Amino acid sequence: MIVYCLGPAGTSSYDAALELFPKESLHLFKNFDALFNALTKNSATGFVPIENSLHGSIDEVLDLLIEFEMKIWKTFDVSIHYALGALDKKKISKVASHPQALAHCRKFLRKNYPNVEYFPVNSTAFAVEMALKDESTAAIGRLNTLKKLKLPVLFNEIQGKGNTTRFAVVSKKDPYPKSKKTQMSIALHPTDDHPGLLHKLLTPFKVYDVNLTRIESRPSGGKFGEYIFFVDFIGTQKEPRTKKVFEELKRLADIQIVGEW
């Protein structure tokens, strides 16, 4: 199996993919747009972060799942750890890292570097490379990446408590056709907007005793106030109660299957 993930080597995505798919061929991409675009043209699977325990869903990935009509086929919860490194601790005026990593370490930065500039970049590994060229830049990255590239480590374990990221295997076709499915994720595209719409969308889940595990909204990309609702729940398409829920929902919204695992 060929696995596409966010690079370069040394990022959280790369390290997680390397650990979970040690025998597979990993292809690295500089951004999520390039990764999803490549998935549409090749028979490969993507490995992407979809949610973090501290800061919620990765909005960019959710939007791309909808746009490219990819599906989630498996998920993995991975504990994420970060360290801070710099060439000269006395000259630090900015901290570079991936936006998610900066957010995960916000409390540490607020306490220890309250007046520095936050400098978001495409990956934690790239941030480390930046810090190696500029004494005024500190980098947040994986500890093993800092050590490998020989950037002096100033602090370790600077992420928020319980920092866990959920990664997903995504593709058009199911790479695990024989695995037992127990959960689903759908996107609801309302066909109309009126008072009580959200209540009506959620009511069938209660009526048919389907347990929700996540619900959130994203802008539809059209007018202000128009949203797509992501709903995760325990169940599969083959279950009678899921079919009944879908029958009710189809009266109010178009249903897009986002994943089944």
Image: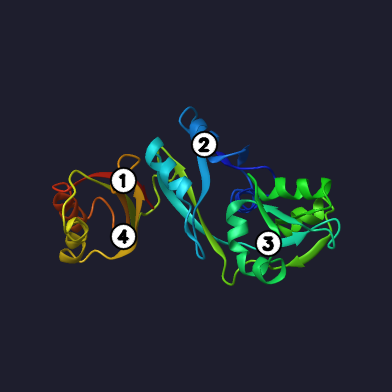
Amino acid residing under circle 2: Asp
Q: Residue at x 81, y 52 (%)?
A: 148
Q: Note whether 28 is above or below 77 in the view shown.
A: above
Q: Residue pushed farthest top?
A: 41
How far apart in space, not on screen, are marks 3 and 2 (Cα)?
A: 25 Å
Q: Which of marks 4 and 1 is in front?
A: 1
Do callouts 2 and 4 mark residues in contact (Cβ within 8 Å)? no
Q: Note whether 24 is above or below 109 in the view shown.
A: above
**Mark toward the start of the polypeptide (4 vs 3):** 3
**Mark toward the start of the polypeptide (1 vs 2):** 2
Look at mark 3 in the image and give the residue it sits on: 82
Q: Which disc number belongs to residue 33?
A: 2
Q: Which residue is drawn at 79% across and 50% down?
A: 131
Counting from the top left corner in percent of width and height, residue 152 is at: 84, 59
**Mark toward the start of the polypeptide (2 vs 4):** 2
Counting from the top left corner in percent of width and height, residue 175 is at: 45, 42
How far apart in space, not on screen, are marks 3 and 1 (Cα)?
A: 37 Å
Counting from the top left corner in percent of width and height, residue 153 is at: 81, 62
Q: Residue pushed farthest front?
A: 115
Crowding at dot 1, Cα within 10 Å, few <14 / some 14-19 / many 20+, comes out as few
Look at mark 1 in the image and give the residue it sits on: 224
Amino acid residing under circle 3: Tyr
How far apart in space, not on screen, are marks 4 and 3 (Cα)?
A: 31 Å
Q: In which quadrant of the rendered image does the N terminus lie?
A: top right
**Mark toward the start of the polypeptide (3 vs 2):** 2
Look at mark 4 in the image and give the residue it sits on: 233
Do callouts 3 and 1 mark residues in contact (Cβ within 8 Å)? no
Q: Which of marks 1 and 2 is in front?
A: 1
Q: Compare residues 141 and 2 and report the one nearer the observer.
A: 141
Q: Which residue is drawn at 47% across and 46% down?
A: 61
